Image (cartoon, grey):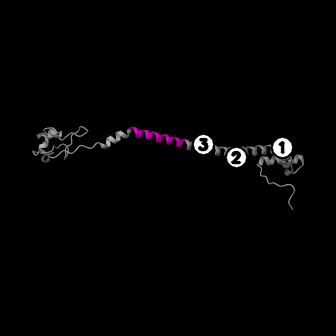
Amino acid sequence: MPAVNPRLSVTLKPSTAALLARLSSLTGNSQSSTVGELLTTCEPIFERMVLVMEAANEVATEAADEMTRATSEMADSFRRAHGRMEQQLGLCLDEWEKGTGELLGAMEKVQRRARRKSSAAAGAGMGASAARPRPRTAAAEGYPANSAAAAPLSNRGVRFQSGKRGKPRPATDSGDF
């Protein structure tokens, strides 16, 4: 048959257990009745503590609900602002198209220059200097006149020589470089 008053098993620190044993020997009561009397005496404090903790749980739940609602409202606000920004960007792009459309249209109409006609095909249509092929010379190529011993300058200002270092290239009369 179940007991009218519920029983609890409590684990105490050794120092607390020693104090409880001394108190129960002084009062002549058992340790369990001494603990029961102490808790009954503190019942108003326990009741107030339970009420405070229930209120704290309720406030925490309401705060979580409020935070969820506020987050949802904030997300909706950001979505609306994003939509307005996209609309404004579209208007700006439309204005850009209006302002640059004529320029782009004119640029698309511009065609590249026609290729030069070869000297045989040029004939009488072009001047004699344009029809005559230009000779390949060291000066025309940007090389020094005595390029047998010197190679052209690189973009770093040093001269490149093929073969092993220190040996200049042999001189050629053909003019090919």
Residue 115's spot in the image, x, y percent? Answer: 21, 45
Give the overall secondary structure of the magenta segment.
helix
Residue 147's spot in the image, x, y percent? Answer: 14, 40
Residue 60's spot in the image, x, y percent? Answer: 70, 44
Q: Amino acid at mark 2?
A: Thr
Tag 2 or tag 1, which sits nearer the N-term?
1
Q: Is residue 95 something one can see in this rendering?
A: yes
Tell me which residue sits at (78%, 44%) in the image.
51
Q: Which mark is residue 44?
A: 1
Frontmost residue, 92 versus 25: 92
Disc 1 from disc 2: Cα separation: 26 Å
Magenta stretch in the rendered image:
81-99
Mark 1 neighbour density, 10 Å: few (under 14) some (14–19) many (20 or more): few
Disc 1 is placed on an element classified as helix
34 sits to left or right of 134 = right
Q: Amino acid at mark 3?
A: Met
Disc 2 is placed on an element classified as helix
Mark 3 neighbour density, 10 Å: few (under 14) some (14–19) many (20 or more): few
Tag 1 or tag 3, which sits nearer the N-term?
1
Find disc 3 in the rendering and name its residue: 74
Disc 3 from disc 2: Cα separation: 20 Å
Residue 68's spot in the image, x, y percent? Answer: 64, 46
Find disc 2 in the rendering and name its residue: 61
Tell me which residue sits at (34%, 42%) in the image.
105
Mark 2 neighbour density, 10 Å: few (under 14) some (14–19) many (20 or more): few
